[in-house]
Image (tube, rainbow, N blue to C red):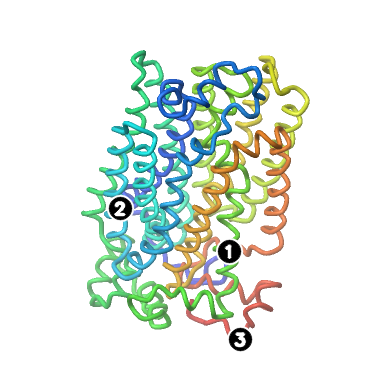
Amino acid sequence: MDGAGGGREYGGRVTAFVALSCITASMGGVIYGYDIGVAGGVSSMEPFLGEFFPDVYRRMKGDSRVSNYCKFDSQLLTLFTSSLYISGLLTAVLLSSWVTASCGRRPSMIVGGTAYLAGAAVSGGAVNVYMAILGRALLGVGLGFANQAVPLYLSEMAPTRYRGAFSNGFQFSLCLGDLAATVTNYGVEKIKAGWGWRLSLAFAGIPAVFLTVGSIFLPETPNILVRQGKDRLVVRALLHKLRGFQAVDQELDDIIAANILAAKPGDNGMHMILSQRQYRPQLAMAILIPSFVQLTGISAIGFYAPVLLRSIGVGESASLISTIILVLVSSVSTFISMFTVDRVGRRTLLLIGGIQMILCEVLIGAIMAIKLGDDGGINKTYAIILIFLMGVYVVGFGLSWGPLGWLVPSEIFPLEIRSAGQSITVALCFAMTICISQFFLTMLCQMKAYLFFFFAGWIVVMTAFVYFFLPETKGLPIEQIGKVWGKHWFWKKVVGVGEVAVGY
């Protein structure tokens, strides 16, 4: 049967087995989201700042000589945030890609959950800023493994017609983790003794336990079992259990054909993706898509929403409540994206979301430039308008670049370069997140409101990129998506149509 994109559609339904497997794996998204939410919230808590970052605490409490835009400008504070992503980057580049390719998706998730659990324990028990940073580094090791393995696991386990929804589940679980962290921050901020931030950091271990223990009982993906040389009958039985019907031979044949073209077992295909012309489109997407996601400015708002709101004069509790509302809005929009991406397509959502985010960034920047000076606050009406615009912005992100920034890279790589491609994607995600998290507060201090125009300009660039260079992949089996490059007006010139392998 032909799919929407001219590839074969295998059929099958969403079985309880595949749903439970993917829900368990999505705990990897929860731990990522929890970290995003907890880092920004804890960084705005007065007891935490007073204990570990006294200079920032003094400026926040009313040093009139410091600009509103510069109160939280501290390289040590941003190192606390970005240390996780530095260790995650090193893990993705040096270790997790090889483990995921040679040992499988499931072992990587187990290692990731264990490392994240250790990081949560160290962070919650930190007695000085260096121990807190060490805890963040251990969390980064966990995310380096989880972000490498989980998106691939979801894409390979999901039925073709529902792959977009399943893969978008990673971003939805990320939103749920962010929401859990933000609600936790709000609750523990009320603890008068001042140790509530320890609970926020330590509770990161809860989803890590679910990921670690759950992954022990998960099946490996059919694609990896074939790559590891498992018997055809074993893989066929797993596919039958996943798809809920007997006619799985066509899908299995395509997986086996893709494996024949693949690199040797234990080789993650990094040399192939970097050196061979036919993989240029995938390499470009692996580099540009995660970079574009971070250049939307979402990490700045995700990490520092409470800090931004404090900067414009919103109180500590009010800023955390506003952040909860923003995360709720993001979760709902991502949930909607899960059920629309396989109907309207990837490109449509990316274009709509991009236009929406451009308008919001411009309006936020304009209001802050006009109404917020170096001292004083902003009146309540404009503060509410800013919070509303941030909400509209995160709706656009939740519909588009949030979930699709993980979905598109995870589905475009043929089997022989899949782990290598995902490694590049994760490494670029961490690298760009390091840059944004490390320099955002300094950029806010120097550029002030014009920082939001900076992000708006990049969203214009990435929206144009999607319009001209990203082909649609909805409805295509994962092992046949490679055909779209040979039909695209630009990429067929890059790869040479005759060089595009028929099987992937």
Secondary structure state at the residue bearing disc 2: helix
Query: Whole-Å distance between the Cαs marked 2 and 3?
Result: 39 Å
The residue sitting at 71% across, 42% down in the picture is 358
Classify 83 as above or below 291.
above
Query: Whole-Å distance between the Cαs marked 3 and 1?
Result: 21 Å
Secondary structure state at the residue bearing disc 1: helix
Query: Whole-Å distance between the Cαs marked 1 and 2?
Result: 28 Å
Q: Residue farthest to the right?
A: 370
Q: Amino acid at mark 3?
A: Gly
Rendering coords of residue 196 (x, y %): 35, 22
Say if mark 2 contacts mark 3, CB within 8 Å. no
Say if mark 1 contacts mark 2, CB within 8 Å. no
Which residue is label 3 attached to? 498
Which residue is label 2 attached to? 21
Residue 468 as seen in the image, left or right of residue 144: right
The residue sitting at 50% across, 21% down in the picture is 321
Nearer the observer: mark 3 or 1; the answer is 1
The answer, for residue 247, to whether it is visible in the render is no
Classify 486 as above or below 100.
below
Q: Nearer the viewer, residue 245 or 163?
A: 163
The answer, for residue 270, to whether it is visible in the render is yes
Which residue is label 1 attached to? 285
Q: Nearer the viewer, residue 49 or 190?
A: 49
Compare marks 1 and 2 and give the one earlier in the sequence: 2
Q: Nearer the viewer, residue 15 or 115?
A: 115
The residue sitting at 51% across, 42% down in the picture is 334
